[in-house]
DNA sequence: CCGGTACGATACGGATCGTTCCGTATCGAA
DNA sequence: TTCGATACGGAACGATCCGTATCGTACCGG
C-alpha cells in the first residue's frame, strides 16, 4: 500500500491511516459487522470518507488490514519446548485469540465477506491462513522427526483436522474454544499430551 | 410458518409459497448472495414483495427455508452396510452435496449471514447442523459397539474433526471436496478403510 | 511562488431493505 | 347473499449504504 515512499505533493497523513484502522477495529468489535459502515468509520476516525477510498479500494480491504495488523503480532509461534509442545502451543494460541470477541468478530466477518469476494478470499488465505499453515507445517515435520514411529499422518490432513475443528466450532456450532476442549481435540489427533500435568 | 391451518380470511397461496422458495434457490445459485435482492426474488417468482414479507420476517429467513427444503431430502443417511461404512457414507454424502455450487453457495451464504444474525445462527444449527450431528452420533455409537477395541474417541470430538475439516476446506481454504480427499480425512481419523478396493 | 497531491466537507447516483398504502380477490360465517 | 377478515399485486416511501465526484483549503518539493 505504501510502496511509493516519495511522490510529489502533500504526503499522506500517517495519523489518518492509523485512525482509520483503529476506528474500523473499534466499530467492528463493538457494533459487529452491521454497524461497520464506511461512513461510520470515517466519522469515528475524524476523517473524510474520501481519504479512506484514496487508500483502500473498498470496505473489505480496510477490514482486512485492520484485522491482520491487530492479530499478526499476537500469533508468533512458540520458540521453546519440543516440537510437539510447540505445535500444541500454537494451536492453543490461535484458539485463545479467536475466543476473544475482539479478534473473533473481525475474522468471522472476513470469512463471511470472502464468500462472495474472491479477492478478499485470496487475501485472507495468503495473509492469514497460509501463514498459520506454514508455521504449523514446519513444526509438524519436526514432530515427525522426533517421533518417527508415530502414525505418519499427512501434515496437510492433520492441519485440516485440527484447524478445521477450531473454525467449525467458531463459525458454525458456536462452542467455546476453552483450553480444555482444545486439548481434547489435540489429544484425539496426536495422542495424549505427554506433558499432561 | 404454517402452524395455523385454518384462520379466517383468504388462505395463503401455496403456489406463491413454492414460487418464492424456488426463485430464491435459483437466484442464489446463479447470482450468489449479493445478487439476491428481495425485489429480484419477488419479480422472479411473479409475486409481490409484500407477499414475501407477509410470510418471512427478512431475507435470511427466506433463504433458510429455501436451503433446508432443498437439501434435507438429499441427506438421508445410508441404511445399509456396517455402521462404519454408513458413517463414511454419510460424510461422503455431505461432502458431495457441498461440492455442488447449487448447495454450497446457499450454505456458505447462510453461515456468513448467521455470523451477525443470532436467530439465523440458531435456526441453522437446529435445522441443519444438529440433524447431521444427531445422525452421525447414532452411527458412531454403533461403530463403537462393532469395534470396541478401536480407540474410544469422544464422538463429539470425532464429529468436530471430520465435519470441521470439511467445512474448513469449504469456507476457508476453498479446496475441492472430492471423494479421494474425503477418504484421506476419514482414514486419518478412523483408520484405513477396511473396504478399500 | 507554483504545480501537485492530500485533506475535510459535502453532495450525488444507484441500489437495497423493510414498511406502508392502495384497490382487488377470495375464503368462512352469518 | 352479505360481510368481516385476510391475502393478493402494484406501487411508492424513508432510511441506509456504497463508491464517486466536486468543492475550497492545507501542505510538500522545486
Image (cartoon, coloured by chain):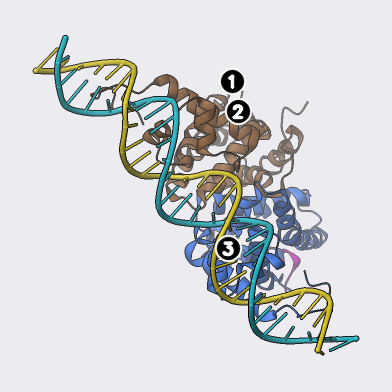
Chain colours: A blue, B brown, C yellow, D cyan
Residue at mark 3: A38
- Residue A109 in the image: state x and y as whole percent: 58, 56
Is C30 drawn above or below residue A72 in the view shown?
A: above
Q: Which image quarter is the N terminus of chain A in?
A: bottom right
Image mark 2: chain:
B
Is B111 drawn above or below residue B14 in the view shown?
A: below
Q: CA distance from mark 3 to mark 2?
A: 50 Å
Q: CA distance from mark 1 to mark 3?
A: 55 Å
- Residue B29 in the image: state x and y as whole percent: 63, 33
**Mark 3 burial class by Cα count in 10 Å: few <14, some 14-19, many 20+:** some
Q: Is residue B139 left or right of residue A17?
A: left
Residue at mark 1: B80
The answer to whether the residue labelled 2 contacts the one labelled 1, judged by CB atoms less than 8 Å apart, is yes
Image mark 1: chain:
B
Q: Which residues are magenta?
A: A80-86
Residue at mark 2: B86
* Same chain assignment for discs 2 and 1: yes
Whether the magenta-drawn stretch holds residue A170 is answered as no
Image mark 3: chain:
A
The residue lying at 57 percent from left, 34 percent from top is B143
Amino acid at each position: 500500500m505504501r510502496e511509493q515512499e516519495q511522490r510529489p505533493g502533500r504526503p499522506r497523513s500517517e495519523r489518518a491511516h492509523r485512525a482509520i484502522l483503529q476506528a474500523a477495529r473499534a466499530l467492528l468489535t463493538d457494533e459487529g459487522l452491521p454497524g461497520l459502515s464506511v461512513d461510520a468509520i470515517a466519522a469515528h476516525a475524524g476523517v473524510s470518507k474520501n481519504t479512506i477510498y484514496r487508500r483502500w479500494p473498498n470496505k473489505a480491504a480496510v477490514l482486512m488490514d485492520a484485522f491482520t495488523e491487530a492479530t499478526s503480532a499476537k500469533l508468533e509461534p512458540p520458540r521453546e519446548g519440543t516440537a510437539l509442545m510447540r505445535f500444541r502451543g500454537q494451536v492453543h494460541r490461535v484458539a485463545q485469540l479467536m475466543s476473544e470477541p475482539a479478534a473473533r468478530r473481525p475474522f468471522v466477518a472476513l470469512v463471511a465477506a470472502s464468500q462472495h469476494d474472491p479477492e478478499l478470499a485470496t487475501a485472507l488465505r495468503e495473509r492469514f491462513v497460509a501463514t498459520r499453515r506454514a508455521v504449523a507445517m514446519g513444526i509438524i515435520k519436526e514432530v515427525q522427526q522426533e517421533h518417527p514411529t508415530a502414525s505418519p499422518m499427512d501434515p496437510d490432513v492433520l492441519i485440516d483436522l485440527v484447524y478445521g475443528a477450531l473454525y467449525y466450532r467458531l463459525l458454525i456450532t458456536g462452542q467455546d474454544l476453552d483450553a480444555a476442549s482444545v486439548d481434547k481435540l489435540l489429544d484425539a489427533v496426536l495422542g495424549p499430551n505427554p506433558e499432561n500435568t
